[in-house]
Amino acid sequence: MHACVRHASARLASFIDQFIASLDQRLQAYKLLVGQFGCFGCVSTLSPEELLTAAKTLVDSYPNDLDSSFVDELYHFAKFVDIFKDDEPGNISTELFLYKLIIDKGVQDTFPNVAIALRMYLVLVVTNCSAERSFSKLKQTENRFRTSMTRGRLVNPAIMSIESDSLRETNFTAIISDFAVAKLRKVSGL
């Protein structure tokens, strides 16, 4: 009995270590994102020097997507945002409000790099969440079935786990009936 408890305790400790390492890795990734895109959350309160530094950091991080005019563009965008800061609703993020402001006011041509940077930021978070969830589910499924399943057979349970919301809504009775009819062996004489 003691060996069983030690084994379970070791597995729990291993799981907790993996969990902490995974959280630390995610925290570092989010700190990097805040360092790059954090200026948008407080664009109207930053000093011109802080805006300049933030813009240069973002251009250096994404030189293929943003050009050097982004530095001046962000400064002018901050002044533009000051005009509409009282219109910001409390139920959406500041970054989404800023992007909607650009679209609603039709100033995409005036602030093209800001629109690109905001779009990149807004998409990065969603993309990261979906990928993190998929890898997390795959790792859980792989650990659970590691002893009896090959990697090729792990794909289906991983997909089922990731898409569990859709799976819960599926009518399995109809699927089983259709499968049974398709695979029914006809026995002569009955």
Image (cartoon, rainbow, N blue to C red):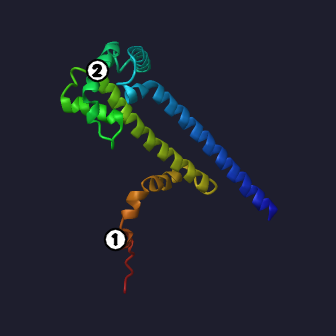
Q: x and y percent of residue 81 in the render? A: 28, 26
Amino acid at dot 1: Ala
Name above or below for residue 93 compared with residue 38: below
As displayed, is residue 58 above or below residue 133? above
Left or right of residue 10, residue 116 in this image = left
Residue 107: mark: none
**Which one is nearer the viewer's eye here, 148 or 166?**
166
- The residue that mark 1 highlights is 174
Task: Indicate the secondary structure of the residue bearing disc 1.
Answer: helix
Question: Badge 1: few (under 14), some or many (20 or more) residues near its Cα, within 10 Å?
Answer: few
Residue pictured at 35% horizontal, 68% vertical: 171
Identify the residue under disc 2.
Answer: 79
The N terminus is located in which quarter? bottom right
Judging depth in this view, the residue of 78 and 29 nearest the camera is 78
> What residue occupies the far right of the structure in this picture?
2
- Identified at 39% across, 75% down, the residue is 185
Residue 64 percent across, percent down from the top left: 37, 19
Residue toward you, 67 or 177 = 67
Using residue 29 as the reference point, say whether residue 54 is left or right of it: left
Image x and y of residue 126, in percent: 40, 40
The amino acid type of the residue labelled 2 equals Lys
Quarter of the rendering containing residue 129: top left
Find residue 183 and report its image quarter: bottom left
Give the Cα distance between marks 1 and 2.
Answer: 60 Å
